[in-house]
Amino acid sequence: MMDVDRSVNLGAARESMRQPTTYRELEAAGLVTSRRGGGTRVAAAPPAGPGPDEMLRHQAAAFVRETRQLGVDDSQIISAVARALAASMQDPDAQVR
């Protein structure tokens, strides 16, 4: 109790003296949040990165933009993608011609 009394005299919060080091480390890492009188709770998870569907849409949109800048029409784009898919089924390392 002497350490707690001393911490109060020095201006430190009582809770910080009693709170186990592990909780303070978890809080510093952003894994938990603590509130006086409210306890310690698991922190909200950070937003997840883009999922595979979103990444695919992004890559496909970029591909379409780039090929259209080359003057390629939609039927040529579709044909090129179909050839690339067919080639990858036979040999994943194959280059499309």
Image (cartoon, rainbow, N blue to C red):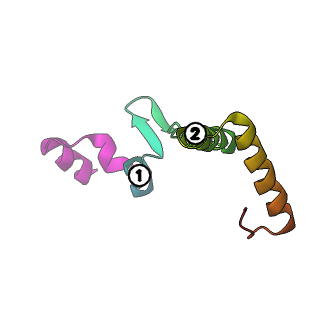
Residue bounds of the magenta highlight: 1-19
- Location of residue 54 in the rendering, given as x and y in whole percent from the top left corner: 63, 38
Image-quadrant location for residue 15 = top left
Residue at 29 percent of width and 50 percent of height: 1
Q: Furthest-front residue in view?
A: 71
Q: Residue furthest left?
A: 10
Residue 46 among magenta residues: no
Task: Relative to 86, say whether 76 is above or below.
Answer: above
User: Which residue has dot 2 on it?
Assistant: 71
Q: CA distance from mark 2 to mark 1?
A: 51 Å
Q: Secondary structure at mark 2?
A: loop
Identify which residue, 76 or 84, lies in the foreground.
76
Q: Position of 16 compared to 68: left or right?
A: left
N-terminal of the pair, mark 2 or mark 1, is: 1
For label 2, the crowd category at 10 Å Cα-Cα, with few meaning under 14, some 14 to 19 and many 20 or more, is few
Would you identify the image quadrant in which residue 64 lies? Answer: top right
Magenta stretch: helix, strand or loop mostly: helix
Could you tell me residue 89's position as x and y percent? 85, 61
- The secondary element bearing badge 1 is classed as loop
The residue where tag 1 is placed is: 29
Residue 82's spot in the image, x, y percent? 80, 49
**Percent coordinates x, y for residue 53 in the rendering:** 69, 40
| Residue pictured at 44% horizontal, 51% vertical | 26
Which residue type carries mark 1? Ala
**Horizontal placement of 33 versus 58: left or right?**
left
